[in-house]
Image (cartoon, coloured by chain):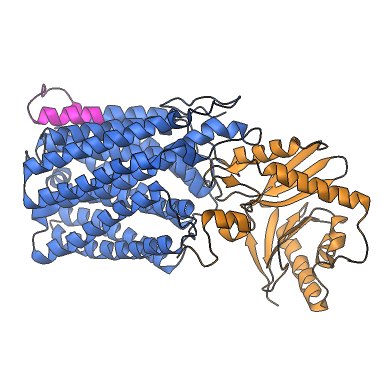
Amino acid sequence: MFIMTEATADPARLKFLPGCEVLGDGTLDLRDKTQAAASPLAQRLFAMPEVAGVFLGKDFVIVTKGSGDWQHLKPAIFGAIMEHFRSGAPVVCAPTPSLPRGAEENGKAEAVDRVREALRQVIDPELGYNVVDLGLVYDVVVENGGTVRIIMTTTTPGCPATNYLKRGVGEAASAVPGVEFVDVTLTYEPRWAPEMMSPQAKAHFGITDGGSR
Amino acid sequence: MIGVSLSRWTMSYFAAALLALVAAEVMMTVGYGFPNAALQAPETLILVHIVAIGWLSLLMCGALFQFVPVLLNRPLYSNTLPLPTLLLLISGLAALVLGFLQLAGRIDPELPLFPAAGTLLGLGFALVLWNLARTFSAAPTLPLPARFVAVGLVSIAATAAFGIIFALVLGGATDYAPLVALTGTGLPLHVIAGLGGWLTFTAIGVSYRLLAMFMLAPELEGVSTRASLYLGTCALAVVIAGGTLAILLHGDSAFVLIAAAAIGLAALALYGRDVLYLYRARKRPRIELNSQMATFALASLAASAVLIVIFMVLGHLADHVDALVFLLAFGWLSGLGLSQLYKIVAFLTWIECYGPVLGKTRTPRVQDLVVETRARKWFLLYFIAIWLGTIALVTGYAPVFQLTAAAMLVATAGIVAQLVRTRRLVDIDVLPLPQGTHRPRLLVSLPR
């Protein structure tokens, strides 16, 4: 297995490309060991005390370091990723369908839906469509105590509207009843692409998968 | 750093630039300068510099102060410098125009107008370069479009250097033989470095990103884009360095120009291929007016390249250089500039007005600030006038050229009126402004 690395805009984050599929669909942002319970790969990475976060994408893993330098950390991360893929273990454990979700979990799922619905009033000014259906909102997590964590992107890095979009998303989420604190994180990994739009948004723009012509 | 702020003075640059464009079109309409005066007559030089510095360079500087941070995802080094820079460039242009009037015998010959123009414009462009170069140096990597802009910035340094040399020699400040030799035969180098390097190469770099952004097309980083960058850079190096050496060593600068033209045309061909790909691979089937009208500007660039080849083959390039420069300056550069201004003004106005209330209340789209059906006719009139004007210059019908210039003036006035309406939010006045927003000022952005 040959693992490549790519620098990111944030020096504390490094992208690892193992050359195979990591997560089939979507992304997963894991910020501590508790959240990593869902992913055997993330568990291996969090076993290193220097690792502060793991972001899983289609064919990459982004590791956020809390301390140490990459020169020393990289070999250990290479080892953990190789060991994981050789073991044949899944990247993410499949949910157990037979177990009904608890009331708390159901409540959180509903809260996520309410937040997503509220974010639909925030439009990308250039495209004139809401940020949720454009696929600019990568993840919404509702935690205990009314804390909402949102990971989002913009269509173009460096766009002058970026800070307004970030603030607007925060404002819209804050207005949802029961939300006490909102943390909005911007990311450009992965970069947004029109393919990330919802079917409704694609239909609105007349986008077909093969391009316009 | 994630997120880039609004450039406070970009609207002031755009306003000054549009004023210069209207002034130039008035001059052409009344027959001031070429073709009613010789190509190197003071009247023509006044007209040319009002277009090159007053219109195109101010437009480009204003756009770059806003757009280079977007290209690099880094804030502009200084948001304070653009105002003194603008004042230096405008006062330098005024001194230059007066210097040409002095050359024509209309002003007291004792006044040191050319040295003053050289100093003011030199300082102005030095500040542009300093501000943008510091912004570039803070970026960890340079995307391909930014590299085109970087080459464009080197070219403006060369263009300004030639211009300052000409100003010092013409103003009698020096009679140093090499500088006099450059002033005597270096005009093509000054024109190509300015029109080809600074304005065209920078516009190409910006267009790669803008077209991809507005049409949801893939960003190009492939072999043909790189080859276009390297070939174009090579062509400019041959013109600027090779041409200067040829003049100083009394060599054949015509050979240098032909070699550079061949390399430059290859670069343009690759750019054309990339642009066709961008339009074909776009995800947005219904493109907006700015991207539609940009096709006419790109067609003007392609037509210029084809005409250069035809006239070179026929041996009549020198006879038609006026028509080619006109088509490049007004069809390609001004056409692209006006079409993108239509979008950029709306976008920056939206951000300034509605950005602060995003997420708190419903907001309109950028497209709601403009009425494309009303603007379209002015753009069509503009491009038709440019193409007829080019034909008039090629065929030598000066009165017809004046008529087309009048049509350009009317079309430009129509486009400017649309820009003012957008800036003043006239076309969405049916909706009251939401609480917490303010109507943007016409000439300056005050982001909150």
Kindly identify the residue that appears in the image at 51 percent across and 48 percent down.
B72
Quarter of the rendering containing residue B38: top left
- The chain whose colour is blue is B
The reply, left or right, for residue A19 in relation to residue A181 is left
The reply, left or right, for residue A18 in relation to residue B356 is right
Query: Residue A93: x percent and y percent?
Result: 84, 67
**Residue stretch in magenta:** B93-114
Q: Is residue B107 magenta?
A: yes
The reply, left or right, for residue A57 in relation to residue B431 is right
Quarter of the rendering containing residue B228: bottom left
Kindly identify the residue that appears in the image at 54 percent across and 25 percent down.
B432
Query: Residue A119: x percent and y percent?
Result: 69, 43
- The chain whose colour is orange is A
Kindly identify the residue that appears in the image at 60 percent across and 37 percent down.
A164
In what quadrant of the picture does the C terminus of chain B appear? top right
Q: Is residue B178 magenta?
A: no
